[in-house]
Image (tube, grey):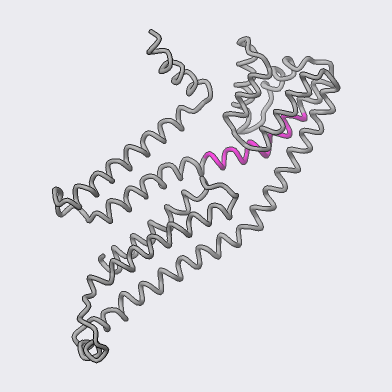
Amino acid sequence: MSKNLPKSDFIKNIILTGQVTQFIVKTVTIVSALIFSLLAFLTLLGIIQNFGTPADHIVLAILSVTGIYGMYTSLQARKIYKIDSIFPDFVRDLAESRRAGMTFTKAILFASKGNYGILTPEVQKISQQVSWGSSVTDALIAFSERVKTKSIQRTISLIIEANKSGGNVADVLDVAAKDAREIKMLEAERKANMASYVVVIYVGAFVFLAIIAILCSSFIPAMTGSSAQGMQGALGGGSVRQEEILPIFYFATLVQGFGSGLVAGVFEDGNLSSSVKHIFVLVFVNWIAFKILLGV
C-alpha cells in the first residue's frame, strides 16, 4: 500500500489544485512531440518513405508542442489577466465585510455569494474549502497556487500576515486592494509600451522571409541555371545545384522564426511561456511559405 500512496497523493494534489486540464495538455503535448520525433528518425533511416521529410516531421513536432501548449497558455494568460483585474474588488469587499463586524471566515462565505465574473468560481472554491474545515490561510494559499500571479500571491501573503497579527485587518485589506490595482495598471502600461517592439519583431521576421523567398524564386535559379555555367567557370567554382542551396535558406528561416518568436514573448510580458504562441505562428508561416511557394 505504501507504494501506491505517492501515486494517489499525486492525483489528489492535481485534482485539488485544479491542474487536471494542465496535466492533460502537457501529456498530449509530450506524446505528439514524441510521435513526430519518432517519424523523423524513421524517415531519416529510410524505414518510412514517401511520408514527408525528416525536416517536416521535426517542424510538425515543434508546431504540435507550441500549438497545443501555446493555445493553452494563451487562454490561461487571458483568464488570469481578467482574474487579476477583478481581484482588487474582491479584496475591497472583504474589507467592507470586516468593518461590518464579520469574521474573516464569514466574510469569505458572504463574498462567495457575490458576482465577480470570471473570479466567481475561484471565490466559491475558497468558500468551499473553508466550509469543509480548511483554514482560511490554507484556502487562500491554494487559490494563489492555482492562479500563480505575482500580484495575487503578494496580496494573499499580505492578507494572511494581517490576519495572523490580529490588527486592523480591514485597513490592511484596503491597502492590499489599492496595491493590487496599481500593480495591474503598471503591468498593463508596460505591456502597451512593449507592444510596438513585438510588432517590429514580426515585421522583421516577415521581411526576412520575403527576401529569402525572392532569392529562392528568382536569384538562385538564375545563378544555378545553364546560363550561369560560364560565370561559375570564370569564378573558378564548380557547379552548384539549386536543390543544395534551398534547404540552407529553409533551415535559416525556421531558426530565425523560432528565435524571433522567443524574443517576442519575452518582450511582450517578460515570460518565456508567452513565447510559445509566437514561435508557433512564425515557424508555421515560414514552413507553409517554403512548402507551397518553393516546394522544398
Instruction: Give left or right: position of 106 versus 143.
Output: right
As drawn, 278 above or below 225:
above
Q: Using the rendered view, name the quadrant where residue 27 is placed.
A: top left
Residue at the spot 55% in from the left edge and 65% down from the top edge:
200
Instruction: Indicate the position of residue 174 as horizontal and vertical percent values.
Output: 81, 31
As drawn, 60 above or below 30:
below
Residue that extends furthest to the top in the rendered view of this protein: 1
Instruction: Give left or right: position of 156 versus 208.
Output: right
In this view, the residue in front, 257 or 80, is 257
Instruction: Indicate the position of residue 288 as horizontal and vertical percent values.
Output: 33, 60
Residue at the spot 46% in from the left edge and 32% down from the top edge:
22
As drawn, 55 above or below 65:
below
Residue at the spot 60% in from the left edge and 21% down from the top edge:
125
Q: Using the rendered view, name the quadrant where residue 4 is placed.
A: top left
Instruction: Indicate the position of residue 290 as horizontal and vertical percent values.
Output: 31, 65
Magenta span includes 158 = no
Residue at the spot 86% in from the left edge and 22% down from the top edge:
168
The magenta segment? 76-92
Magenta span includes 88 = yes
Instruction: Give left or right: position of 113 versus 239.
Output: right
Q: Main secondary structure of the magenta part?
A: helix
As drawn, 202 above or below 165:
below
In this view, the residue in front, 237 or 108, is 237
